[in-house]
Amino acid sequence: MIGLIDGNNFYVSCERVFDTSLEGKPVAVLSNNDGCVISRSQEFKKLGLSMGTPYFQLKPILVSSGILLKSSNYELYGDMSRRMISILSEFAPEVEQYSIDEAFIITELPKGCDYYPLAAQIRKSILDWIGIPCGVGFAKTKTLAKIANHIAKKLEAGVFVMPDDARSILESLPVGEVWGIGSKLVEKLARVGIRTAQQLAETDTLSLQKRFSVTVARTGLELRGIPAVSDENPEEPSQSVSCSRSFGYPVTELSELEEAVSFYTASSAEKLRGEKQVAAGATVYFQYYPEYGAQTADGGFASTTLSFDPPTDDTSAMLHPIRPILRGLYQKGRRYKKAGIVFFGLEPKMAAQLDLFSPAPEAGNRSALYEMVDKINATHGRGTVFTLSSGINRKWAMKRSLLSPRFTTAWNDIPMVK
């Protein structure tokens, strides 16, 4: 079974962990350089204010509405995300981080066992250990798990396990609420009479592939309980971009880990440029094997989070701060099974707000360079042109005036107990 764990109003929830005065109040977190709303509490949502509302529109009503605003504290959010992923690794052998606040887990219980108690235990552990409320949904496929999670978030218990026969649920679910079905596809599907998730599930796979795409056909299979879909939605801009791979053999050298992270960074940056988005920061992680020799050691993760100033889609500008921190994650003698990077704080490139008093970004001079690199790779094949730091053989501060302290990542910001 596949579980999807998704932090509720994640950025706001992180702020509330260390500032309990925010509980029960309309709270929102602002984008890079305090541009617009990117995370809302339930109380904020009830005011009828939408995601993306500009800060300047909120200023006149802050006092009368009781709204409280916070600048994006990506160091805090990234660290809380890593802690959540670490907790999930206690419950499942395979954890796949999808975004800063979402992760899939894959686990199998003995035949006949109920997944509900496991889901409830996962949710309780995350809430008790790091204070983040979340929804937990279990199902046979990722697409169904997304639906299960959506249902879970509306329930008081915050947990839902998709029944083997999901017909009654899918019949009442608009096709536009299915993961990977964007607004343009909704219109096209409606033309052939597909308006609900169940109708999509019942449509012949070959017909879906011919009329629409392989992705839509795979989604139909997933709705029937057959694992098939990729993680990508080609129509909608990503909320986060990630790239990771399991190595072909246990990696032990730092140089190979550096190459892998450089390669994943370049791949993710290319996707960002394709979507005309920039990232405010990234989480980098290594996963290592347990050891069972003369000296036993548990397997686990090593990770860290950093911010880009200003937000960027420039591969070189990303690698410059990323590569120096990798040595601090590396443990000599450990065998590594996987490395990855997750970019967060995404926003449209043209809408990214820069600090008036910050030095002019050097990356601007490389826009044409990377535009040409992307064109060459699109024409002659991915990897035709690449950064040297990615390896050849491949064997293996923004303006934030409302910023909360970095409670978990800076010694001077650790809360004092009185």
Image: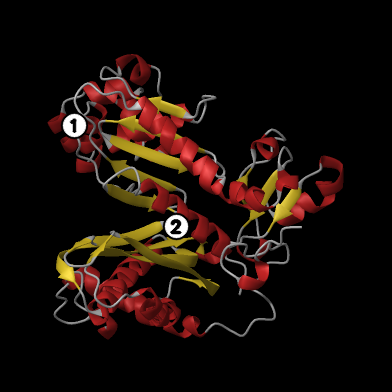
Foreground label between 2 and 1: 2
Q: Residue furthest top?
A: 168
Residue at (20, 73) in percent of width and height: 383
Residue 410 shown left or right of residue 92 in the figure: right
User: Against 226, is 267 above or below?
Assistant: below
Is disc 1 surrounded by few (<14), some (14 to 19) or many (20+) residues within 10 Å? some
Residue at (28, 61) in percent of width and height: 244
Residue kind at label 1, given as amino acid type: Ile
Q: Percent from the top left, x then y, of residue 204? A: 16, 26
Is disc 2 surrounded by few (<14), some (14 to 19) or many (20+) residues within 10 Å? many
Q: Quadrant of residue 331?
A: bottom left
The local secondary structure at tag 2 comes to helix
For the N terminus, the quadrant is top left
Q: Percent from the top left, x then y, of residue 6? A: 45, 42
Numbered circle sitting on residue 226: 1
Q: Residue furthest front?
A: 294
Residue 418 shown left or right of residue 191 in the figure: right
User: Against 211, is 326 above or below?
Assistant: below
Residue at (20, 31) in percent of width and height: 221
User: Against 80, is 157 above or below?
Assistant: above
Q: Nearer the viewer, residue 272 or 143?
A: 143
The local secondary structure at tag 1 comes to loop
Query: Mark 2 — residue?
Result: 82
